[in-house]
Image (spheres, rainbow, N blue to C red):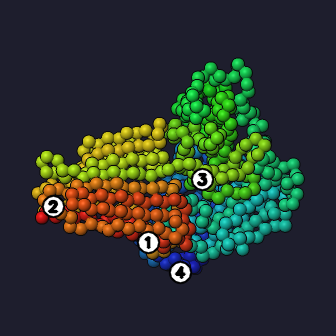
Amino acid sequence: MAEFGKFTDQELLIEKVSFEPEAKHVVLYESGDSYFKYGGIHTDYFYRYKVLTDESSDFGDFRISFYRGDNLFEQVSQVKAQVSYLDGNSRKNIRLGNEAIKEVDLGDGYFEIRIAFPQVKRGSILEFSYKKVSKMLSLLDGWGFQGEYPSLYSSYRFKAPSFFQYQMIIQGKRLAEATKVSERSNSYSWILRDIPSLPIEPFVGSLIDYQERVDGYLFSSEYYKEEELESSEIFYASWDQVATEILLIDDYRSYQYKTGPNSLLADLDFSDSTQEGQAKKIFDYVSTSYKSIESRWLEPIYPLPRMVELKRGNSFDKNLLLNYLFRMHGIDSYLIMINERGKGRSQLIEKPYIFQFHSAILKAEIEGKQVFLDASDSIMPYGLIPVRKLVPRGFFMEKGNGRLDKLSINHRSGTINQLIFEVDEGGNFFIRTTERYTDYAALKWDENYSGLSQEILIKQDRYKDFELIDFEVLNQIKEKRMLTVNYRKPFGSLEDKVIALEPFTNSIFFKNIFTQNERILPVEFDYPNYESYNVIIPIPIGYELEDYPESGSITIPSKGVKFSFQISTEADEIKINSRIELSQSLFPVEEYSDLKFIMESIADKYSQPIILKKK
């Protein structure tokens, strides 16, 4: 490990990163060393950065997050930090004290060490180190060799006792080639040099998916050869065995429905003429009657009787209660563990390892249809789960058939816009607009805009600089998975000799969302969606149609994006029907040029005004 204040000639002289010359900051050296000692897994961290620019007002503050909980689950100690900076032609050092290194309580057992460096300017070298001790023996924090800044040197080492066997997950060809491992697979090390920063691009999923990175988890507490694992007695032999063992935990077992007149909540009336109607009543009851608690544990916080008494719980408590009530009323269902977006890798580890998951949802069979539900979110309507849980696969905890399997959430998310151009008695033009949002698009509008005053609303991107008249919102998300917005907008009068109409200014595709010539990472939208416009423009008496965009349609080769634009013109009216359909959410890098071209074409079409001119 490097020592504070002892720099190599290269570190002192470097002014530009050869493989990333535009970089403003560089990691000179970073290392992590994980090993077993009294109290858990100890990891010693060391970081050294250099400032290469005078524009560093946003650099120099570092945060170390950890979860202490009630039982010192994680602890951070021995924090040291120092800055070496240029003062004229000489270099000076400042060792940071308590005023610059502070611990902050974030609540719910979470803490953060915050380091604020002084003298952050061109030529400054910032370095800090600390120790972290974790009682989570089953899971390593891992090491990302690639991050926000380019790195000249990055190393990670992990050593476990010989009676432990860890499954290491190595991401990146160069990293795989750099792996050094002991004969008994209990000691690993990696060193990489000249590592480019992760690219900053729009519409990217989890950056961890693309990072040169190593993670690990405890696979066995005894040593087994690979071919012996399936026949062994260890916990992680198969996904079905994991599900079986988890469902035998006392708190899980308390949610198993047992027939009888004294069953908990048996007096609640959810009667309905259809099974789906009954399921919706049960879902609404659990979703709205019990408070949701954030929790990092992959199990219920309370046994069923206590949860019902307190009327609160985490995603496992609430979805297990939903499962309990479903089974009470003859609806087949079971729990699914989910790895939420933004909290780790989107691709699941194939071998049994539950700590890659974060929360739960429920799968039910209702009137012959698969339905996925999440009762932990009181805003979520029946039949949808939160966007952060829209992942390709999950851990299906079906009794006797525990497995990784695909999730298939049925939704039609998008926006239908109806615009009618009108002229009032005073000769003023208005656009009467109806925006109808469905499924996840409705939830997104509700999250972004509901509750905002009209003064604040017109400062938001979608309604920027609009004068909104008769503005109203009809929120039917819970009942119909739909939200409707109505308003009128003035834009001119009959006194104008030329009227330029732009019906599509509030479309998310009005401007090209892809401006890069080249793309490094895949493009990922939150979900497949659509946007359609139905526009009616009466031509006022005394005016004639001067110019307008032509009809046309375009589809990319993969059929992942389709665009149709149809315009019809008559003596007294113009009609436009336009539709954009994104039938997939993930587009590989190879399709970027096609995606960029069609988005440019849409933006070009939408930006062409319809011109009316006085005769």
Q: What amino acid does circle 2 point to?
A: Tyr
Front residue of 359/53: it is: 359
Q: Give the image quarter of residue 144.
A: bottom right
* N-term mark: 1 or 2: 2
Q: Provide residue 433's location: percent of width, then percent of height.
A: 30, 49
Q: Provide residue 477's location: percent of width, then percent of height.
A: 45, 40
For discs 1 and 3, the disc positioned in front in the rendered view:
1
Point out the residue furthest to the front here. 571
As drawn, the label of residue 113 is none
Are the residues tagged 2 and 3 within 8 Å (C-beta)? no
As drawn, the label of residue 18 is 4
Above-or-below relation of 477 to 607: above
Q: What is the spatial separation of the Cα atoms under label 4 and label 3, in whole angstroms?
A: 38 Å
For discs 1 and 4, the disc positioned in front in the rendered view:
1
Residue where numbered disc 3 is placed: 391
* N-term mark: 4 or 3: 4
Residue where numbered disc 2 is placed: 543
Front residue of 347/334: it is: 334
Front residue of 188/49: it is: 188
Dot 2 crowding, Cα within 10 Å, few <14, some 14–19, many 20+: some
Residue displayed at 81% across by 67% down: 182
* N-term mark: 1 or 3: 3
Dot 4 crowding, Cα within 10 Å, few <14, some 14–19, many 20+: few
Above-or-below relation of 259 to 61: above
Are the residues tagged 4 and 3 within 8 Å (C-beta)? no
Are the residues tagged 1 and 4 within 8 Å (C-beta)? no
Are the residues tagged 1 and 3 within 8 Å (C-beta)? no
Q: What amino acid does circle 1 point to?
A: Phe
Residue where numbered disc 1 is placed: 597
Q: What amino acid does circle 3 point to?
A: Val
